[in-house]
Amino acid sequence: MQADTEEIDCASESCSLFAQNGPSSHLQLSVIVPVRNEAHHLIDTLNALRLQRDSTGQLLNSDLYEVLMLANNCTDYSYEIAADYQQQHPDFPLRIAQIHLPPAKANIGTVRRILMDEAYQRLLSVGRMNGIIASTDGDTVVDSHWVYNIMLEIAKGNDAVGGRILTHSEPSQVRLYHLRDVMYRTLVAKAEALFDPCSHDPWPRHFQHFGASLAVTCQMYNQVGRLPKRPFLEDEAFYRALLRMDAKVRKSPSVKVFTSSRMEGRVAVGFSEQLRYWSAMNQTNQCQMAEPAEAVIIRLRNRRRLRQCWQMHPQDWVTLQQIAGDLRIDPHWLLHELERSRYFGELWEKIDEKMATGLWASHWQPVPITTAIRAIRTYLANAESIVFETDPIGTYPSADPAGDVAAAPRPLSPETVHGPDRP
């Protein structure tokens, strides 16, 4: 299907990009693939999606999932390649369409939103409110168990799943910057599992939640207001929306994809832009910086304490003052925001923003990333030795029942939250 359009709203029932091929009555998961000039990668992408397997290595029943591919503003043969592939593999539920968007809308945010809305409507049309919308990209090759492992994580009660995004090894100084960044973020994720554990996202886990591998239930997709309208970084905005409503997001290491590490990306801001930034840093001998390890640990420990305080009535004013002191924010402001927040994620987002522009940011100046990596490793080694002494099996702590916040709003208490009068 081809379309030239000035305005597309696939949340409406009249959206018909893929209407010529209705969904299977057994459909459980709809994969969305935005494509723009991906002729060199597309066959590998489609092969990987077609040859999905279960835990025993058997091919998945093709009635359980489908692939919605939308070629947008292509100047190569991406659409024609997909159409040929569709003819060669008629049993593979690949649905393709192409559109030409005006410049103001010709961006990844618009296209991913169109596709996710379309997948949402198709799943709802067969009664799958808990059906799964799974996003990947046209330059990405999913693991052979990608669909199965996403389904497995959702079946455990999670609302969304972020997959591990791996790049092919290319010897260069830029890759060294990338690997340092990955190491730092992985260590932070491990610190989260120790100092602010979460029962639905235990260790091992990773740190990624991006469009190349991101899945969500229809119910949660609707609950957070669908994909935010952003020209780029729409996946980051969507992740923030999920956290804001305490959605259970699992960053599963078993859900993984491989993507290109090209620097001539299709979007103005994204991974390719980050690679270009690191390349410029390397050429000018700039040092890669990161938040100090001590700041990371203080943030995580106090987030856990606040998560527990959040469910208490009345509030423990002494503990709130201690948390505010550690996070370098005003305790009266903290108490006020705690009163008004229906979700813990909503509260923490406000605190994060406050810390980023306040005394916290001026006190905890960035340090060389190699220094931060060494320091976090030391913290983790010491913490893990304590865990092992108290638990010979060496398992990571699970979240306290009171601290593991479910994706349901806290009823705002009509009673006064106890604390000193605010000036």
Image (cartoon, helix red, strand yellow):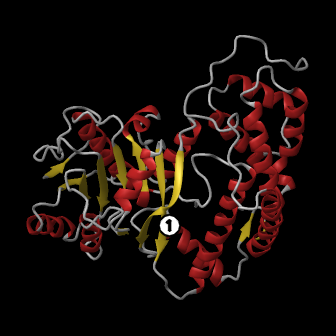
Residue 312 against residue 50 in the figure, above or below: above
The residue sitting at 45% across, 51% down in the picture is: 153
**Left or right, residue 412 beside residue 210:** right
Residue 297 against residue 306 in the figure, above or below: below
- Residue 273: image location, x then y, percent: 51, 68
- Residue 406: image location, x then y, percent: 58, 34
The residue sitting at 19% across, 51% down in the picture is: 63
Query: Which residue is under mark 1?
Result: 271
Residue 239 against residue 350 in the figure, above or below: below
- Residue 218: image location, x then y, percent: 37, 38
The kind of secondary structure element at disc 1 is helix
Q: Which kind of residue does numbered mark 1 sit on?
A: Phe
The residue sitting at 73% across, 39% down in the picture is: 351
Task: Examine the rendering and report whether any part of residue 194 can be seen.
Answer: yes
The residue sitting at 83% across, 39% down in the picture is: 329
Q: Say which quadrant the C terminus sits in.
A: top right
Which residue is nearer to you in this view: 294 or 130? 130
